[in-house]
Image (cartoon, coloured by chain):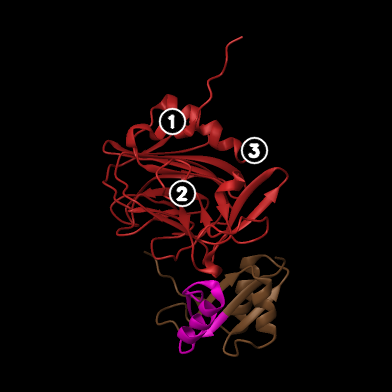
Amino acid sequence: VTLSLALLVTAVDRASVNAALESTGRGPGNLSVPCSSTGSAPATHYAAHTWDDDLAARCAASDFPALLFRAADAEASDNFLALLSAHGLNTVDEDG
Amino acid sequence: MPTRRRLDPASLFVNGVGGALYDISDAASIFQDSAGTIPAAVNSPVGRVLDRSGNGNHALQATSAARPILRQAGAIRYLEFDGIDDFLRALFAVAEPMTRVSAIRQISWTDSDRIFGAGATVSNGELIQRTATPRMALTTASSSATSTNTEAPIGVDIVVTEQFAAAGQQLAVNNGTPSAGSAGAIAPGGVTIGANRFGSNAGNIRLYASCMVNRALSAAEQNLLRPYIGGKAGL
């Protein structure tokens, strides 16, 4: 594994994309981090970060059309924030 | 020449004492998948860490994107949690008194992010980044009921000793004097390594080893356990 892979999907497409990823053996609920333009609820998008070169290749091949992504040889947090910034988003705090 | 006593951490769990022992240096206890069928590999995600306490409280992550990654620096192996969505979880009964000794590194600091969150039910019995960088604290009745607020350096490997007891909490970094906090019952229902019980407030940390014992360890036991756990980080 060499690339940091940041993922983003709209709230509307979240369930279908998570189901599609689960069908590839990646488990449930991969897109789990709520995001919005203000950083407050309700979430308009959901994001994730992973190290998965196979998934990066499949994203590049548009296997998951609704999934926005950014693959980079970078620190996880830098790559993740770059993807969110490109779409004007912030994470929504869900302190428990 | 006197012989320094050595500790077998499994001995802390005799007579049915609950808890968990996670040792990332033990290659045979780490797997890429949560089912434990694919041995872990450096620079690949980890979905299962076996509990070496004998209690069977293995730490799991079934979701691919939420798995920490196994890293290696020299001979030292550790799990790196990305601070975004990574965590491992084990669900089991925990009550005070509870003592946890861990070798970790805070890679970065964000208020309310967890190093160790609760497993389920309520947010207590946690080690949390709190108040102001680079401080950490323990939680009792809720995530906001923190005390024993202690400085812990960022970007440096440390050994953290947490003790939750009826008489009060104690939190120590390395061999420093423990800071004392108010008493408060805990029932975290296990442990979530690197996030809270909802899988959010993910901490950006390294984990080398953690020994979580469901009893109050004596000062002598802690003094033996700290170097054992710290040794997993080369300390």
Callout 2: residue from which chain? B
Chain letter for red, please.
Answer: B
Chain letter for brown, please.
Answer: A
Say few, some or many: other residues with alpha carbon within 10 Å of mark 3 (under 14 / 14 to 19 / 20 or more): some
**Residue A83 x, y percent position in the rendering:** 62, 78
Q: Does the magenta stretch include residue A21?
A: yes
The local secondary structure at tag 1 comes to helix
Relative to A55, is B184 on the left or the right? left
What span is colored magenta in the figure? A8-37
Q: Is residue A60 magenta?
A: no
**Residue type, mark 2 in image:** Met
Q: Which of marks 3 and 1 is nearer the N terminus?
A: 1
Kindly report the distance in space between the C-alpha atoms of the residues bearing marks 3 and 1. Answer: 22 Å
Name the image quarter holding the N terminus of chain B: top right
| Closer to us: B197 or B16 | B16
Confirm whether circles 2 and 3 share one chain.
yes
Residue for badge 3: B234
Relative to B195, is B142 on the left or the right? left
Q: Can residue B99 be seen in this view?
A: yes
Q: Is residue B206 visible?
A: no
**Residue A87 x, y percent position in the rendering:** 59, 85
Task: Tell me which residue sits at (61%, 55%) in the image.
Answer: B39
Q: Identify the mark at residue B11; answer none if there is no mark.
A: 1
